[in-house]
Image (cartoon, rainbow, N blue to C red):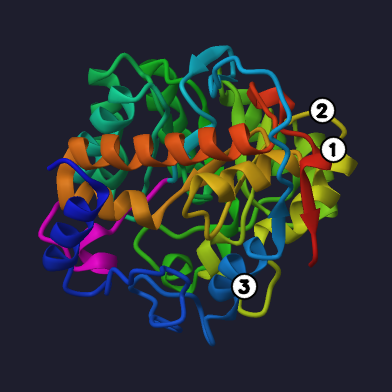
Amino acid sequence: MKTWDDVYECAKKRCTICRCCKICDGRACRGETPGPGGKGSGSSFVRNADMLKQVFIKLDTIASNEGIDTTTDFFGHQVALPVYAAPISGIKQNYGADMSDLEYTKELVEGCNLVNTVAFTGDGMYDDMFKNPLRILEENDGFGVPTIKPWLFDNMKWRIELANDTKVLAIASDIDASGLTNLRNSVTPVGFKNVDDLKEIKAMIQVPLILKGILSVEGALKAIEAGADGIIVSNHGGRVLDDCPSGIEMLEEIVAAVDGRVKIYVDGGFRSGNDVFKALALGADGVLIGRPISQAVIGGGAQGVQIYMNKIKLELKEAMAMSGCKQIQDITRDKVIVKM
């Protein structure tokens, strides 16, 4: 495979649930959960894509002629670009691809390593849905971020201990998964976590803690109080709450309130290097991408991830060049116009 079109066409053939829409905006799969869609009316997924289109990049090509550098820092580790693979599990259930979560994670992590960026790995109600991805990270010197769902305490504890032993880069928890009905009633139930609960969890973790599913200033301030080192502004791909705002809508307000105290990442509907540029201009330290990277793995394995990430990197470099930015830190608020 040589191009993203090659990978995409192969993914479309291998997925029997996800339609692999050319424009992946949640409209065709409204309410399809389990599956790739958004919850209820699907409005939250659709809003992720729509609101990104309300941010515009300013053109400014009167600039110096040096090259463009997309490298950035991820908790003390230099990576090639501020774009990371979002945690995904349930590949057969949600995409209809004949691929186990273990096979998926192996290709995902290898692909991210090929382009020197970081994969967030998934978790699920059965123990192996966490242990198997973690084993892949162990085989790759811990270079990745395992995600732990907000299980009841004992099931979080042993996962944290295993992740600590693996010496991963950081540990994430998608705390908004506490509201997923199928997980609340599963063999390994999730539960809501208050600030004191999160402080107890943080005390067990030997690496940075990233809390995923922050979508308000109030939530961000609670995350800081709990001791988080990073947050991911996210509505879980529109899959946990109907009629809620998108990550890009809430990002700038949260960035202002946090005022540099933690790293801020964002996800939800990001599909291009231009989209990444917009998030960085509004204050994000990086972007997580989910569905297209899942399609990249399904369609082309590690090579598919490499092709997709290189596509995003090229698009980001082009956006930077056309807006007068030479390094990631040059992408500032004055480089975009917001019409939301």
Please report whichever mark, 1 or 3, sits nearer to the chain's N-terminal start. 3
Dots 2, 3 in contact, CB < 8 A:
no
Q: Which residue is mark 1?
A: 258
74 in magenta: no
Amino acid tagged 1: Val
The residue depicted at 24 percent of the width and 28 percent of the height is 110
Dots 2, 1 in contact, CB < 8 A:
yes
Mark seen at residue 47: 3
Amino acid tagged 3: Arg
Drawn side of residue 245 relative to residue 308, left or right: right
The residue depicted at 64 percent of the width and 29 percent of the height is 202
Q: Secondary structure at mark 1?
A: helix
Q: Secondary structure at mark 3?
A: helix
Mark seen at residue 261: 2
92 in magenta: yes
Amino acid tagged 2: Arg
Q: CA distance from mark 2 to mark 1?
A: 6 Å
Question: Secondary structure of the magenta portion, mostly?
Answer: loop
Per the rendered image, the range of residues in magenta is 87-100
* Viewer-proximal residue among 319 and 261: 319
